[in-house]
Image (cartoon, rainbow, N blue to C red):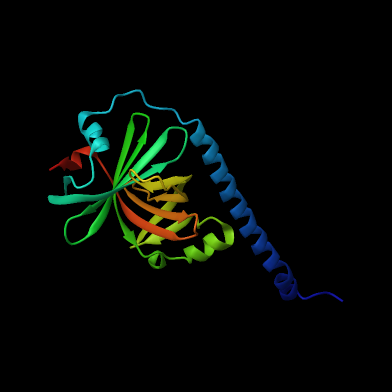
Amino acid sequence: MRIPTANIFCIFMPNLVKRRKLYGRFLFILQLYFMRITNLFRKKSQHALSLEESNILTIEANKKIIFDTCSWTIKKIIEYNWGELLVSYDYILDNGSELKYLGVEQNGNNLLLSIKKDINIELIDSNVKSEIISNEVPPRILHFNGIQFLFDRESIGKSRLEHSSDWTNLTVWEYIDKSKKNVLTIEQYSDKEIFSSVGTIISINEISLD
């Protein structure tokens, strides 16, 4: 007896879809491990930090900076250690009505700056939390406020409030849009808490010390 074509489709299609999903997930995980290995051999730029960049790295809590014609007070500083001499900082900024983060990433003599704010992870399309719990990684593509963000890199390290001795392990997944201007970050800590933030990459000329 011949099996109707429609029945054959019903039998094989679910397995085909499942295999494609598993294959896509395998490629994503393979990409993550490749990035981890690449980070270990990341080359350092030889140019010296500018005076403005050096000043940002030495600024302390309770100091003020000017960004977007507004004065912001640095409330706290979060320090991140990624190993292999890779460090970064989040300066928690308060202008009296809202909080933002000045992200400062130092890789040798390279400095990458961003301004970010916290967002509710539930506002991101896709069930990100469930994806992370089920697959240990978030989706490769995310959308927020009409912007498509593409997975950029995964970083594993630890963080602490500056001058504290209590380090917390975390994993960070970073996304960037096609313009290379907008960024989205998801952080998962060792206690399984998950946070997300969104922002833009800025230049050193966009901020100044008050």
Q: Position of residue 195 (x, y in %)?
A: 40, 59
Q: Quadrant of residue 54?
A: top left
Residue closest to the eye, 157 or 2: 157
Q: In the rendered image of this protein, does residue 166 appear above or below residue 36? A: below
Task: Name the residue rendered at 37%, 26% in the picture.
Answer: 45
Which residue shows up at 27% across the image and 28% down it?
Answer: 49
Q: Nearer the viewer, residue 54 or 7?
A: 54
**Quadrant assignment for the C terminus:** top left
Q: Residue lying farthest right?
A: 1
From the viewer's perspective, tell me whether residue 201 is left or right of residue 127: left
Please tell me which residue is depicted at 50% across the width and 59% down the height of the picture.
192
Quadrant for residue 52, please give it. Answer: top left
Question: Is 179 in front, or is 89?
Answer: 89
64 and 46: which one is in front?
64
- Give the number of marks: 0
Question: Left or right: 104 with respect to 186?
Answer: left
Q: Is residue 202 above or below residue 136?
A: above
Residue 95 lies, in percent from the top left, at: 17, 56
Q: In the rendered view, would you say 17 is above or below 110?
A: below
Considering the image in quadrants, where does the N terminus appear?
bottom right
Residue 22 image position (x, y, % from top left): 64, 57
- Horizontal and vertical percent position of residue 39: 49, 36
> Which residue corresponds to the image point at 42% horizontal and 35% vertical from the top-left?
86
